[in-house]
Image: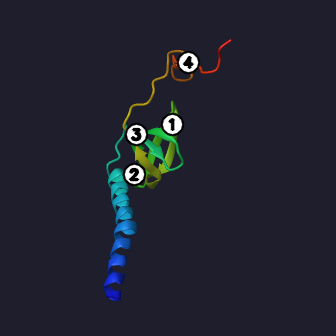
Amino acid sequence: MQLAFLFILLALMWVVLIVPRQREARRQRALLATLEVGDEVVTAGGIHGRVVGVGVDDDTVMVEVAPAVTLKIARRAVLSRVDEPAVPFAPGLDRPDPSPDPVVGTED
C-alpha cells in the first residue's frame, strides 16, 4: 500500500511539475522555428520590435525597434510574437495619439 501511494505521488508530481514545462518548451521551439520577416516580437529583455532579417547561421535575428535602429539578437531571446498591430503614431507627433479621455482629478 505504501509503495502504491509513493508511485501515485510521483506520478502526480510529474503531471504537475514536468508536463507543463515540457509543453511550454515545445511551444517556444515552435515559435522560434516559425519566425518570419515582418513578425512583431517581444524579447526576453522586454524590447518590442519587428523582425527584419534572420541571420545566416540561423541563431540570430535582426529586429527593428525604431526607424533606422536595428538590433541583432539571439533567436532564443525572442519571447513571444505580438498578435495585435502596433499603435500608429499621429502625424507630426513623437508619440501615439493622446487619449480623448479626460484626466481624473483635474477639476478646477
Q: Residues within 10 Å of mark 2 (few under 14, many from 20)?
A: few
Residue 56: mark in rendering: 2
In the rendered image, residue 93, in percent from the top left (x then y), is placed at 55, 18
For the residue marked with disc 4, what is the amino acid? Leu
**For the residues marked 4 and 3, what is the alpha-carbon distance in whole angstroms?**
24 Å
Viewport quadrant of the C terminus = top right
Residue 93: mark in rendering: 4
Secondary structure of the residue carrying tag 3 is loop
User: Which one is closest to the eye, mark 1 or mark 3?
Assistant: 3
List the residue tagged with mark 3: 82
**For the residues marked 1 and 3, what is the alpha-carbon distance in whole angstroms?**
14 Å
Secondary structure of the residue carrying tag 2 is loop
List the residue tagged with mark 1: 65
What's the residue at 42%, 55% (across, down)?
A: 59
For the residue marked with disc 1, what is the amino acid? Val
Secondary structure of the residue carrying tag 1 is strand
In the rendered image, residue 76, in percent from the top left (x then y), is placed at 44, 55
For the residue marked with disc 2, what is the amino acid? Val
Q: Earlier in the sequence, mark 2 or mark 4?
A: 2
